[in-house]
Image (tube, rainbow, N blue to C red):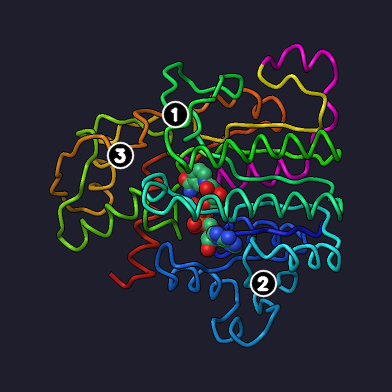
């Protein structure tokens, strides 16, 4: 397959590209390399794939020196003309849209970024798929759309009409927009609601990265809601395996019995939504204990209140994903954390 992966200099995109090229797909990666977090890490990921910063600055498309079937282009999702031209010339079989402005707390500071990248940018992807049809569009949604849902585990059949951050609202919008395009133009789309992804090459704005950096620098860590929060931490390899399997299984038009079963998904459009998570929530304090053990150093914990926009607990019901693609996340939390700490020490020479 020839696949477009947007956000390919990002955490999940980087790992996904590696997996796709290793399994023999041809990949075009796209990313605007914005400075939401340190760009050196994004260039580091690209360098690992055999693509240098110099080449990105001088050539439009950069051929990876590590993978013959990977090319990279630095571009913004909001450039609709470019996307339409790209889709026309490349004739992709499938698209995985991971490029987005991520982060719950940042959406209170810079709301416009979320509308431009996540809503306008995603519309441009949908329009490109409309005019240059692909066999499957898979896109990133998020567990944060469950908002203050108290029914656990979270199911894709739960009503999620009350987001508590603009980030969550933008991801819910993506699901609504995808459904519209699946219905109107028969584009097979699958939304994946990711649950707190962690692992090597992870994101510096997320807990594992922040805590590791602070502990190693001897600084205190901020523990929100006094550590009384639960997250369904999901290891990157388990996420990537899920994306690859889902990508190979485009949704067909839902039949009548499926429509009846899926109360929240009463639609005949080739449209599907899945939770993708470990389905085993961990208390933040236990997570920090495991991290301290892996680093071999105790953290100074500053207990803080819950932050606006944050949810208390996340827990993925992955029954549908098990049924449809035999999804079996297998990475133990301690193993995943230790892999991250090893990578961090190596990359930052700590
Ligand atoms: N990591 C998680 O735990 C998690 C959880 C839920 C959802 N998600 C979603 O998964 C996707 C990937 O997340 P990630 O953790 O890899 O984040 P990331 O920030 O590391 O990767 C996203 C990439 O998209 C790029 N990007 C942003 N706006 C762009 C634009 N307008 N045009 C082109 N590129 C743009 C960024 O430069 C970045 O490299 C995102 O959509 C995110 O919202 C992630």
Mark 3 or 1: in front is 1
> What label does residue 147 carry, if any?
1
Q: Main secondary structure of the magenta part?
A: helix
Q: Does the beta carbon of the residue at mark 1 sit less than 8 Å from ligand 1?
A: no
- Is the N terminus in the top left, top right, bottom left or bottom right quadrant? bottom right
- Is the C terminus in the top left, top right, bottom left or bottom right quadrant? bottom left
Q: Which residue lies at the image location 20% right of the left edge and 50% below the top edge?
A: 221
Q: Which residue lies at the image location 54% right of the left edge and 25% below the top edge?
A: 161
Which class describes the residues within 10 Å of circle 2: few (<14), some (14-19), or many (20+)? many
Q: Is residue 252 above or below residue 129?
A: above
> What label does residue 72 carry, if any?
2
Q: Circle 3 is placed at which residue position?
A: 287
Q: Which residue lies at the image location 50% right of the left edge and 33% below the top edge?
A: 145
Magenta segment: 234-263
Q: Secondary structure at mark 1?
A: loop
Q: Does the beta carbon of the residue at mark 2 sit less than 8 Å from ligand 1?
A: no
Q: Residue 236, can we see it?
A: no
Q: Position of residue 226 (x, y in %)?
A: 19, 34
Q: Residue 231, can we see it?
A: yes
Residue 303 within the segment the image draws in magenta: no
Residue 241 within the segment the image draws in magenta: yes
Mark 2 or 3: in front is 2
Q: Position of residue 239 (x, y in %)?
A: 57, 44
Q: Position of residue 7 (x, y in %)?
A: 59, 59
In this rendering, would 123 be left or right of 101? right
Mark pair 1, 2: CA separation: 35 Å
Sequence-first disc among 2 and 3 = 2
Front residue of 198 and 330: 198
Mark 1 or 2: in front is 1
């Amino acid at each position: 397959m020839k696949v477009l992966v947007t956000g390919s200099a990002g955490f999940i995109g980087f790992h996904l590209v590696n997996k796709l090229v290793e399994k023999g797909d041809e990949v075009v990666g796209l990313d605007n390399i914005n400075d939401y977090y340190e760009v050196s890490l994004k260039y580091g990921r690209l360098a690992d794939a055999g693509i240098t910063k110099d080449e990105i600055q001088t050539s439009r498309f950069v051929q990876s020196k590590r993978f013959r079937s990977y090319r990279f282009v630095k571009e913004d999702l909001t450039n609709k003309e470019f996307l339409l031209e790209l889709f026309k010339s490349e004739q992709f079989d499938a698209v995985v849209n991971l490029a987005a402005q991520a982060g719950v707390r940042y959406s209170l500071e810079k709301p416009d970024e979320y509308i431009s990248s996540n809503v306008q940018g995603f519309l441009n992807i949908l329009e490109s798929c409309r005019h240059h049809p692909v066999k499957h569009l898979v896109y990133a949604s998020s567990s944060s759309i469950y908002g203050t849902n108290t029914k656990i585990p979270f199911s894709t059949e739960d009503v999620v009409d009350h987001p508590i951050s603009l980030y969550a609202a933008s991801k819910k919008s993506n699901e609504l927009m995808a459904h519209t395009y699946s219905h109107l133009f028969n584009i097979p789309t699958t939304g994946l609601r990711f649950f707190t992804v962690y692992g090597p090459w992870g994101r510096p704005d997320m807990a594992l990265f922040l805590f590791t950096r602070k502990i190693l620098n001897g600084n205190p860590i901020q523990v929100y809601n006094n550590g009384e929060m639960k997250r369904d931490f999901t290891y990157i390899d388990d996420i990537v395996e899920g994306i690859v399997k889902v990508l190979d299984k485009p949704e067909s038009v839902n039949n009548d019995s499926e429509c009846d079963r899926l109360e929240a998904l009463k639609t005949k459009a080739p449209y599907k939504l899945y939770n993708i998570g470990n389905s085993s929530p961990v208390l933040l304090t236990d997570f920090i204990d495991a991290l301290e053990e892996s680093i071999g150093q105790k953290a100074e914990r500053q207990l803080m209140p819950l932050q606006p926009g944050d949810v208390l607990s996340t827990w993925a019901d992955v029954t549908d994903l098990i049924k449809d693609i035999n999804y079996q996340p297998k990475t133990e939390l301690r193993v995943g954390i230790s892999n991250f700490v090893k990578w961090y020490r190596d990359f930052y020479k700590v």
